Amino acid sequence: MKRFLAVAAAFLLASCATQEPVTPPSSADNTPAAETPPAPRSTARSDRIESQPLKHLVGRKLKPIPDKELNVRTRCAFKDVQGGRGSMDLQVTRAEVKRFVAEVTIPEQGVCRFDMKQFEQTARMPNVVLHDKGSACTVRMWEQGKGVTVAFNGCQARCSGDAFSYLWPILVDTRSGRCA
């Protein structure tokens, strides 16, 4: 009888143990059921993952672009192979924009116009950043190698038609002052 009571008590205690319910994925939820997390890994140095260089970069001595104040002055015009044309008058001295006027015409799409009067400079380093006072338009300028890039982001309000969808950054050759 004692043995019977001991076995019954064991079953009774076992039936009181609770487990977290497993919820089957609903038909609307396409994610697989949660898996049990893996056992914690040891933190030994042999388990650390080392970064490996890309095969194209092995043996090359690449240096980061140095942070220096942007200095550029140009008054240029350009035309691309699709018939688009543009002009830009830009002067940046010691990372402060003194003059910025640009116009880009994209055939059958529209025109984008930018004027410093509608922008305020919000950053100088590492990139010069201009924000439009009336919209979400941002113009960024940076030097890389022997050229300066003037890039536009979110400037649909500064363009007519669908021109902004076709607007590329303007590249300035600092040696010659030409732009493309």
Image: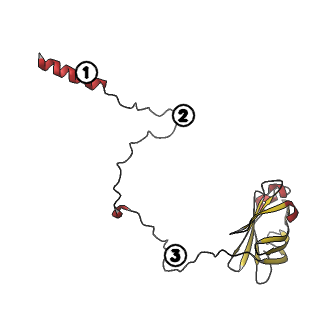
Q: Which of marks 3 and 2 is in front?
A: 3
Using a 10 Å C-alpha cutoff, classify the residue at mark 2 as few (fewer than 14 neighbours), some (14 to 19) or many (20 or more).
few
Q: Which residue is drawn at 12% across and 20% down?
A: 3
* Percent x, y of residue 14: 26, 26
Q: Distance between the residues labelled 3 and 1?
A: 67 Å
Q: Quadrant of the N terminus?
A: top left
Q: Do the residues labelled 3 and 2 touch (CB within 8 Å)?
A: no
Q: Name the residue under label 3.
A: 57
Q: In which quarter of the image is residue 99?
A: bottom right
Q: What residue type is labelled 1?
A: Leu
**Distance CA(mark 2)–CA(mark 1):** 39 Å
Q: Is mark 1 on a helix, strand or loop?
A: helix
Residue beneath label 1, please? 12
Q: In this view, does 106 lie above or below 143?
A: above
Dot label at residue 61:
none
Using residue 20 as the reference point, say whether residue 142 is left or right of it. Answer: right
Q: Is residue 146 left or right of residue 38?
A: right
Of residues 115 and 84, the one nearer the viewer is: 115
Earlier in the chain: of badge 2 and badge 1, it is 1
Residue 158: x %, y % from top left: 84, 58
Q: Distance between the residues labelled 3 and 2?
A: 46 Å
- Mark 2 falls on what kind of element? loop
Q: Decide: marks 2, 1 in contact (CB < 8 A)?
A: no
Q: Which amino acid does label 3 sit on?
A: Leu
Q: Position of residue 28 (x, y in %)?
A: 54, 34
Label 2 belongs to which residue?
28
